[in-house]
Amino acid sequence: MRFIGNKQNIIEKIYSLININNVKGKSFFDVFAGTSSVGKFLKKQGFAVYSSDLLYFSYVLQRAYIQNNSIPQFEKLLKELNFHSTSLFSTPLDLVIEFLNTNLNLTKEGFIYKNYTNGGTENNDIQRMFFTDENGQIIDSIRQTIELWKTNNLVSEDEYYILIACLIETVPFYANISGVYSAFHKKWDSRALKKLVLRPIEIITNNKNNQSFNINSLEIIDKINTDIIYLDPPYNHRQYAPNYHILETIAKYDNPNIKGVAGLRSYENQKSNFCNKENAYIELRKIATNAKYSSLILSYNNEGLMDSEIILDILKQFGKVQFIEFDYLRFKSNNHGINQDKKTIKEQLYILNKYE
Ligand SMILES: C[S@@+](CC[C@H](N)C(=O)[O-])C[C@H]1O[C@@H](n2cnc3c(N)ncnc32)[C@H](O)[C@@H]1O
């Protein structure tokens, strides 16, 4: 998924760096989980994984990828639907996805259609173009169907989160945006014009007791005892919640009050202290002091709010610290989003092995 700070492309490198720097253990806490890409990777390596994030749509992904530990069978639902696949090799999840892709009655009564499409907002002061009319209706119909299945006890809790996670992973491929939901394009991007087809997510199992949370991680940091804690906090002033507000609303589907050109929901309780320089140092010190760990890994970059000398000063009070920097090429839009400039930033890794 396109998500600021997603570590999907560098988690293998991070993992090899922590391995050669004497980080050992069997349990891992992904304290700022985001897309879950780090937790997923560590779960595959056999770690017992804990994860947490302020965002509810992140929690949905964590529940589906991290906490769920079995291949969903959808027994009750498939019996009720009496639906048969056109393919011989479909898994139960594939089958449910195929049903949702082929058997929906589209509705114009959903929150996404009414607030984030051209048709739904045509009589409003602000007309929004986040999704085509058809895709807005498809998103609502899928989301409402999943909720109905849950209300009618046709899906288990794990199956419910897996289906919403499929929708959350699919939607960004059809959104008429540059990557974040704080603005939409004034002309249609060709990707957004394609009809939305729901995609299944990867199911990962590892026989460990993995657990996910939707909470300010600072509130649980002293209650979870793991060998390794991994910190990948926000790097700058930009809060995550407003940038991903539509994914949050699709996940919660709670008819929020929205405002402004982008139709933002309120995010009062989802602000991160890491988006302010002075508070970020305080939070980092709190985590290093109160968390229960043998090794602490911090991902950051050279454009972040916190200075590396001060980070090192804080971490060195607790044990031996390795500081590693490596180049990471990313694309950065210019002011008008027209050209894409290649920009190399330095990805930073702080590895603290605590004194006994
Ligand atoms: C840089 S992103 C993490 C990216 C993630 N490692 C990935 O690969 O997708 C930072 C995340 O921290 C979350 N966050 C910020 N402050 C938090 C806090 N105090 N407690 C829990 N989550 C927080 C944000 O919502 C965001 O998802």
Image: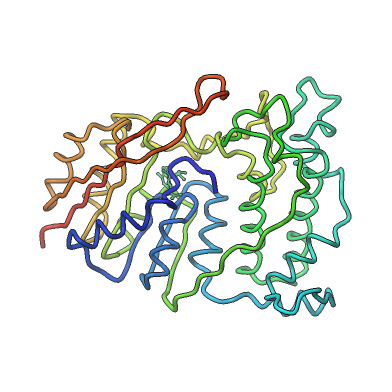
Q: Is residue 34 above or below residue 293?
A: above
Residue in the image at 47% along x and 40% along y: 4
Residue in the image at 65% along x and 52% along y: 170
Residue 297 spot, x, y in % from top left: 26, 52
Q: Name the colour scheme.
A: rainbow
Residue in the image at 81% along x and 24% along y: 124
Q: Quadrant of residue 89?
A: bottom right
| Labels in figure, total | 0
Residue 140 spot, x, y in % from top left: 77, 49
Answer with the quadrant where ligand 1 appears in the image: top left
Residue 246 spot, x, y in % from top left: 64, 40
The image quadrant where one finds the C terminus is bottom left
Q: Tell whether 354 sits left or right of 42.
A: left
Q: Is residue 16 above or below residue 218?
A: below
Residue 131 spot, x, y in % from top left: 74, 38
Q: Nearer the viewer, residue 240 or 336?
A: 336
Q: Nearer the viewer, residue 323 or 240?
A: 323
Q: Tell whether 49 sits left or right of 68.
A: left
Q: Is residue 80 above or below residue 285?
A: below
Residue in the image at 47% along x and 61% along y: 212
